[in-house]
Image (tube, rainbow, N blue to C red):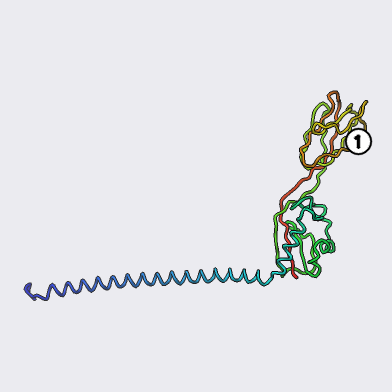
Amino acid sequence: MTASDPTVGTVDVDRDHDRNRDSGTDRGQANLAALVAALVVLTATTGVTLALADGALAGADRRPTERRAAVATTDRLTAADSPLTRRANVLNANAVDALTPDDLVEHVPPLTNAAVRIRLGDRAVVERGDPDDGVTFRRIVLVAAPEERTRTVDANRSLALPRRTGTLRLDFGDAAVETVHVNGRVVLHRPGGLRGVETVSASRRETLTVAFDENATGQVAVTYVPEVTHKTTLEVTVDA
């Protein structure tokens, strides 16, 4: 073949064009395969998500009676006028500890024919029947318990006490005290000196300051019972 052969250049150009076209086709096929794979993954993920959501909604829809009963029980037990609370959403630890299944049904009549379990934190408070297959409702609550404390104070000084302290017990011993003030108000007075043990009622809503007359001497033991609270979870399970 000579340089003047007119087919030489034509054959080379066609081969280059074919190679470029094949390379572009391969890239296009690879991109298409990646797109198809991504769509398959997206479709599968969406399907799983929708299935889970549909399952959860279906489960809730299948148990409306139990759910309403669990919510109503929680609302009743934590209401301000509940026999188990000191105030709304603050449970009285002593009342909760004393709760029985019969008490629970009396407080919440819709539970009469239901299996139920009440848990406070990690312990079961009341259980009747077998509610394991029931619906559970949870609420964050406070639990209040009285905690007796005693402090001894010099009669020529004042003593600050925390809120939620409703009753004070003062033991005067050998102290010479005629007058006791709580938040500036005279709550005890006896000319010639107070003797023995005296009990004083005070507001639970105020921080208290206890003080004595300016001529008082000796020491006074002050016993008070503040309300101590901690946060926990109230869990109600009902199977109707």
Q: Quadrant of residue 227?
A: top right
- Where residue 115 sits: x, y (%)? 78, 68
Residue type pointed to by label 1: Val
Task: Identify which residue, 225 or 37, lies in the foreground.
Answer: 225
Q: Residue at x 55, y 70 (%)?
A: 50
**Residue indicated by mark 1:** 197
Residue 119, compared with residue 143, is above or below; it is: below
**Residue shown at the point (69%, 70%) measured from the top left:** 63
Secondary structure of the residue carrying numbered label 1: strand
- Percent coordinates x, y for residue 231 in the rendering: 71, 51
Q: In which quadrant of the rendered view does residue 100 lie? A: bottom right
Residue under the image location 73 percent in, 57 percent down? 234
Position of 200 relative to 13 (above/below)? above
89 displayed left or right of 175: left
Q: Which residue is more in the foreground, 205 or 147? A: 205
Classify mark 1: residues with Cα within 10 Å, few (<14), some (14-19) or many (20+). Answer: few
Residue shown at 92%/27% (left/top)?
Answer: 193
